[in-house]
Amino acid sequence: MKAKQRTLAVLVVLAVLLGGALWAVNRTKTVLEEAADAASEGSIPLAAVSASNLTQIQVTYNGETNTLDYADNSWTLAEDPAYHLDDTACNTMLTALGSMNAGRTLEAQPGEDYGFAEPYLTVAFTAAGEAHTLTFGAENTVTGDRYVKLDGADTIYTVSASKVSCFAQSKAELFGSFNPAGITASSIQSLTETFMDGSSLSLTAVSEPAEAAEETDGESSSDSTAYETVWRFPGEPDADLDQDKVQSLLSALGTYVYAQVTGADPADYGFAKPLATVQVTTDAGTTAVTYAAGTDGYYLMVEGDDSIYAVDGNTMAALMTSAEDLKAE
């Protein structure tokens, strides 16, 4: 009986020891995993940046420098204040700087350049009144990290390459697509389009009685009249127009542009002989938009705006619809 009790006691002790050993192994594994995660995320802050203290980001990439000024939650390109920036792209840079933590530091090895002789890109930024510069070198293809130096010091850090990619953008890539004329199809009241050959077309929105709604018993209602907006030629009000084609034309007038050129001669982009000029009247007033064909695409200019904007071919196809083409078949 005593022998059985001793055996049971030994088994209990062994179970406790085994359980403790397993806990220690699992705890060690957890600590190592947490350390690995921390290393991959980076635990060495390189930039004390936030939306409340940042005033400027200057990126030099592929021989081009773009200085992004930040004030009142708005971005301006210092080299070209009229340029329409993509706020999302700029905000992504701000966020990337705010979370720019290095995973580790390296001792520079003799003969190793780490890509700093010809940097991948540099990011100079001003936050809380202090200016700093991050210089990014080569990417370690094994770890997926990129080498970086802070303010030209000898210390080399590594950061995740994914944190750096948002800065690798040209001025053209930083453009934010928008509607420079501020026109929407639903806001247009009338328009007159004059083509290069001197021909023109005019359209006016007219409210007309719609077909009478049928009652549930099949009889039309005479108590009320429904109205709908249709488009007509002012000089030919009885002409039956293809309203779908008209809507395509109206939508084209409210198109978003995909590129912007500032400080250029409009004649270099075809505006010496424009394809068409449209006078558009909305409840906000009348705006003139001129369209032209350049050597590498189609462009528009808005009255009162010196910038030249790029538009796609589908937009131009809809805009070049003649009065005859708008008539219903």
Image (spheres, rainbow, N blue to C red):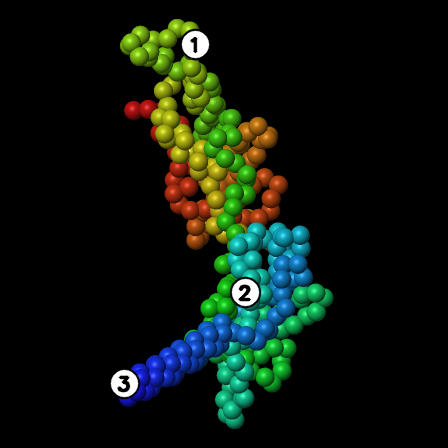
In the image, residue 36 above or below residue 68: below
* First of labels 3, 1 by sequence position: 3
Percent position (x, y) of residue 13? 37, 84
Given the current orientation, which residue lies at the most extreme right position? Answer: 129
**CA–CA distance between discs 2 and 1?**
60 Å
Most distant residue in the front direction: 1
Corner quadrant of residue 65: bottom right
Q: What label does residue 224 carry, if any?
A: 1
Q: In which quarter of the image is the N terminus?
A: bottom left
Residue bearing the label numbered 3: 1
Residue bearing mark 2: 96
Ranked by sequence position, the earlier of labels 2 and 1 is 2
Taking depth in this image into account, of 274 and 115 the one nearest to the observer is: 115
Query: Residue 296, position in %: x, y?
Result: 43, 53
Horizontally, residue 111 falls left or right of residue 152, namely: left
At a point 40% along the width and 78% down the height, the residue shown is: 23
Q: Residue 176 carries which label?
A: none
Residue type, numbered disc 2: Ala
Give, as a three-letter code, the residue at label 3. Met
Is disc 2 surrounded by few (<14), some (14 to 19) or many (20+) residues within 10 Å?
Answer: many
